[in-house]
Image (tube, helix red, strand yellow):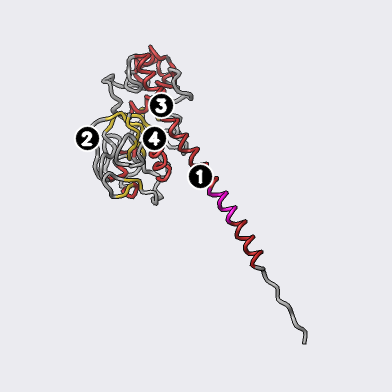
Amino acid sequence: MISRIEKGFTLVEIAIVLVVIGLLLGGILKGQQLINSARVRNLADQNSGVQAAYYGFIDRFRNVPGDMDPTNACTQVGTGVDRGGTCATPANAPGGDANGRIDTIAEAGAVWPHMSAAGFLTGTYSGQSAGTTLLTAATYPNAVALGAVPPNAFQGPILLAHSTDYVQGAQNSRATIVRLSYSFGGNIPVPILRDLDQKLDDGIAGSGVVVSAAEAASGTQGTFGAVTDFTAGTSNCLNTANPATWNVDSSNQTCNGIFLY
């Protein structure tokens, strides 16, 4: 009878394989952490740039960008406020009612051509959906593809407007005080929003200067509901605490972070 010697992996060989797998996984996780950190830093830096541009515009022109009326924008800032060249007919150019607030979707769109044409932001933005058509709640979510507004690191449209569309306190507690609110934009995973909140504030979605958009908590829409939320009813963005906390287990990417100026 011929005997056969069956060979297998020794404990040392198995241990080496496990160590190699562990190193590979550790490298992948570390790489993902570096990518996420870079994205958080990008979002924070973009907010700082917009904030500086906003106050720089006011200091130079004594008007609020976006809210500045179209005729003055064409005269003071220049024809660059409208990529379509409708400053030949100023009433068709992006602009607002000069009431001191960015309080309509059209004005929120006009913010970007005003500040970019004045040299406070890089890039060229029309602030309009097509030709002389002003942005609306329905078209703003697609404004990046239209070349109307700047994108965030996840290619979602950012927004700057006066609003009460943010959480203060518990999950369903919409704010009552109108604040100048910078929306970091759509397509951002909740863990990134939590990390961004920790970097800039207290890490809590219902308190401080970095908070959640109100629609992400309650599913109802306010002044800028269709813009800051993109879809209604995204209640899984937050945990039911008081103040509300970010639900990092959520796969929803329509949860929106707000920075209160």
- Callout 4 crowding tier (Cα within 10 Å): few <14, some 14–19, many ≥20: some
Q: Disc 4 marks which amino acid?
A: Leu
Residue 172 at x, y = what percent?
A: 25, 45
Q: Secondary structure at mark 4?
A: helix
Mark positioned earlier in the residue sequence (1 or 2): 1
Residue 64 at x, y = what percent?
A: 33, 20
Query: Residue at position x 34%, y 47% from top?
Result: 237
Query: Residue at position x 35%, y 33% from top?
Result: 259
- Callout 3 crowding tier (Cα within 10 Å): few <14, some 14–19, many ≥20: some
Q: Which mark is residue 50?
A: 3
Mark positioned earlier in the residue sequence (4 or 3): 3
**In this image, 18 relative to 240: left or right?**
right
Question: The N terminus appears in which quarter of the rendering?
Answer: bottom right
- Image vertical order of residue 99 relative to residue 172, above or below: above
Magenta-colored stretch includes residue 25? yes
Measured Cα–Cα span from mark 1 to mark 2: 37 Å
| Label 1–label 2 contact, CB within 8 A | no
Measured Cα–Cα span from mark 4 to mark 2: 23 Å
Measured Cα–Cα span from mark 3 to mark 1: 26 Å
Mark positioned earlier in the residue sequence (4 or 1): 1
**Residue sticking out furthest to the front:** 12
- Callout 1 crowding tier (Cα within 10 Å): few <14, some 14–19, many ≥20: few
Region in magenta: 22-29
Q: Which mark is residue 33?
A: 1
Mark positioned earlier in the residue sequence (4 or 2): 2
Main secondary structure found in the magenta portion: helix
Q: Disc 1 marks which amino acid?
A: Gln
Residue 104 at x, y = what percent?
A: 30, 28
The residue labelled by disc 4 is: 200
The residue labelled by disc 2 is: 176
Nearer the observer: mark 4 or 2; the answer is 4
